[in-house]
Image (tube, grey):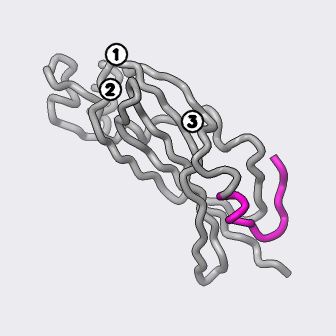
Amino acid sequence: MSDETGPIDVEALRDKFLNVVFDEYELTLDAEKLADYATACGETAAKFTDPQDPDFQAPPTIGSSFQPKVRYPEGFPTFRGLGMDAGKAVAPDKPMRPGVPITVRTHMHDIYTKTGRSGRMVFFVNRMEFSNSGEILGTADTSVVIREKPQT
């Protein structure tokens, strides 16, 4: 990783890093752990809390608990400035079930800017896609924002 000191060249980063999978692994969910997670989240529906329920599945927010093994693509630069968590958005499409292998793939989904009172902010959005046998089960986007230091 290189350390960038000037303004962030968003277009160059987009050209080089968008939509390139940089992390991939497989996981299998455990029924009891899913039930515990759902209960801790305040779920009360049996399809999320009772592994014996015929429609038992992971709660829709489960994707927010998965973490990539690699945070950024190889060669992605680091930047000076104030970095902050800018949120997470989970979009389930199909149920995730215990005992079924899930492939998790992460790619840089978007890089964009906004200008606020304190100057330009650059947002980096990593998307994790969850699938089984090629069928997309859902996604989770994690956003990080860097407020650039003003150039003097």
For mark 2, what is the residue?
34
- SS of the residue under disc 1: loop
Q: Position of residue 116 (x, y in %)?
A: 58, 80
Give above or below for 126 relative to 135. Answer: below
Q: How many marks?
A: 3
Q: Position of residue 74 (x, y in %)?
A: 74, 40
Image position of 85 (left or right of 46): right
Which mark, residue 133? Answer: none
Is 105 within the magenta?
Answer: no
| Front-most of residues 71 and 10 | 10
- SS of the residue under disc 2: helix
Image position of 13 (left or right of 36): right
The residue drawn where x is 41% and y is 43% is 139
| Front-most of residues 22 and 62 | 22
Residue neighbourhood size for the residue with mark 1, other residues' Cα within 10 Å, grouped as few (<14), some (14–19), many (≥20): few
As measured in the structure, the alpha-carbon distance from the residue carrying label 3 to the one carrying label 2 is 19 Å
Residue neighbourhood size for the residue with mark 2, other residues' Cα within 10 Å, grouped as few (<14), some (14–19), many (≥20): many
The residue drawn where x is 52% and y is 35% is 105
The residue drawn where x is 57% and y is 43% is 107
Q: Which residues are magenta?
A: 1-14
**What quarter of the picture does the C terminus occupy?**
bottom right
Q: Amino acid at mark 2?
A: Leu
As measured in the structure, the alpha-carbon distance from the residue carrying label 2 to the one carrying label 1 is 11 Å
Give above or below for 47 relative to 110. Answer: above
Q: Amino acid at mark 3?
A: Pro
For mark 1, what is the residue?
99
Q: Amino acid at mark 1?
A: Gly
